[in-house]
Amino acid sequence: VMSKYKTTDPRRYEPFEQVKDIAVKEQVPPPATLLLREQVEFQLASATWYEEGFQAAMKEITAVFNEAKTCEEICEHYEIDNSSGKWSKELRAEVFNLDLRTNKVVRAKFGPPKGFPRALEKMSQGKTLRDLNRVTFEFEDPLLMALCFEVLNKKYNIHGLKN
């Protein structure tokens, strides 16, 4: 699938290739004095508390991308350095159209909350709970996907990435 993007417009694919993996950082665990069941409840409650603000922030990023006229406008909005001209390409490339009807360049889809039984199972296996607040950004254009990563990297503490 990705070979299509490389051959269709290599200049738009290049910034995506430059996105490097980020080693997963350990998250702050719940207090060790809590029983396992209470630790799971603590983490799920924290995720629930953050969910509304998380969704609002991700919807704002989606809106900025979809309403922008140029990539430079997005860079300006988020204070992304574009002195190299890396992002000086047209925002809406005809060959990478996500939605012809609306002219949107990105969609955000939010994942369902992790259920208590699955979370308890993972933690009882010694695994940590990750991605409790989840969003999938759907792009057709690899350039804009890379730019979105730059925005997320600038605004938030990314805990891990496998490109």
Image (cartoon, rainbow, N blue to C red):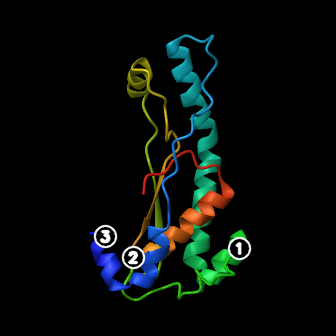
| 63 vs 5, nearest the viewer | 5
**Residue type, mark 3 in image:** Met
Q: Is residue 163 left or right of residue 150?
A: left
Which of the labelled discs sits on residue 98, or is there none?
2
| Rendered image quadrant of residue 118 | top left
Give percent across and percent down for residue 77: 71, 73
**Residue type, mark 1 in image:** His
| Rendered image quadrant of residue 163 | bottom left
Q: Which residue is located at x 70 percent, y 69 percent?
A: 78
Give percent across and percent down for residue 81: 69, 74
Q: Would you place residue 68 above or below residue 78 in this image?
A: below
State the SS at label 1: helix
Give the residue pinned by disc 3: 2
Give the residue pinned by disc 1: 77
Q: Earlier in the sequence, mark 2 or mark 3?
A: 3
Q: Which residue is located at x 39 percent, y 74 percent?
A: 140
For marks 2 and 3, give the one nearer the viewer. 3
**Residue type, mark 2 in image:** Leu
